[in-house]
Image: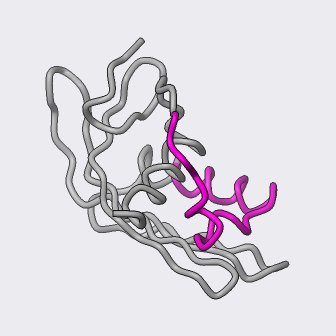
């Protein structure tokens, strides 16, 4: 459960930017790769997420890595379909950093304001 939530947090906080108000305890993030990401890591992460969601075919891996610290990961869009008039994609996410790894798969949909985890209300 923790790994799934960490991946969801990474995805939402970095590129998808949903309109959720979080009130969870985040102490478990201390042991996740994201806890060690710097500004350059996030810049590379966001660019790879955007490339995967906007430009890549299903099954195409988009890899990112920061050569300065060895942090990295990848995104793989697995499936694309229309739901309620929105383009939705299954997106596999894998991240690593500071000898830690994390990965999960989410359904994300493209709203007028950007990509969001499926089920989030557009506001």
At a point 43% along the width and 51% down the height, the residue shown is: 8
Nearer to the camera, 55 or 120: 120
Furthest toward the top, the residue is: 123
Q: Quadrant of the C terminus?
A: top left
Task: Work out whether 43 lies above or below 81.
Answer: below
Q: Give the range drawn in magenta.
A: 23-49
Vertical relation: 89 (above or below) 34: above
Kindly identify the residue that appears in the image at 26 percent across and 53 percent down: 90
Q: Is the magenta stretch mostly helix, strand or loop?
A: helix
Query: Residue drawn 41% across and 70% down?
Result: 103
Instruction: Decide: is 104 above or below 88.
Output: below
The image quarter containing residue 34 is: bottom right
Q: State the image coordinates of residue 107 (x, y, percent, origin top left).
A: 27, 46
Magenta span contains residue 36: yes
What residue sits 72% from the left and 53% below the top?
43
Is residue 25 on the magenta stretch? Answer: yes
Q: How is the image coloured?
A: one colour
Relative to 33, is 5 above or below? above
Classify residue 43 as left or right of residue 20.
Answer: right
Looking at the picture, how far across and down is residue 102, in whole percent?
A: 47, 73
Residue 118 lies left or right of residue 98; in this view the side is left
């Amino acid at each position: 459960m923790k790994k799934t939530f960490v991946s969801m947090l990474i995805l939402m906080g970095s590129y998808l930017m949903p309109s959720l108000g979080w009130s969870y305890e985040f102490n478990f993030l201390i042991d996740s790769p994201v806890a060690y990401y710097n500004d350059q890591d996030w810049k590379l992460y966001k660019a790879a997420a955007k490339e995967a969601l906007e430009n890549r075919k299903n099954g195409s891996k988009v890899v990112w890595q920061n050569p300065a610290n060895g942090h990295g990961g990848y995104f793989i869009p697995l499936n694309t379909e229309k739901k309620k008039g929105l383009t939705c994609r299954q997106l596999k996410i894998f991240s690593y950093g500071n000898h830690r790894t994390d990965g999960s798969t989410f359904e994300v949909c493209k709203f007028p304001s950007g990509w969001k985890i499926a089920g989030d209300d557009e506001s």
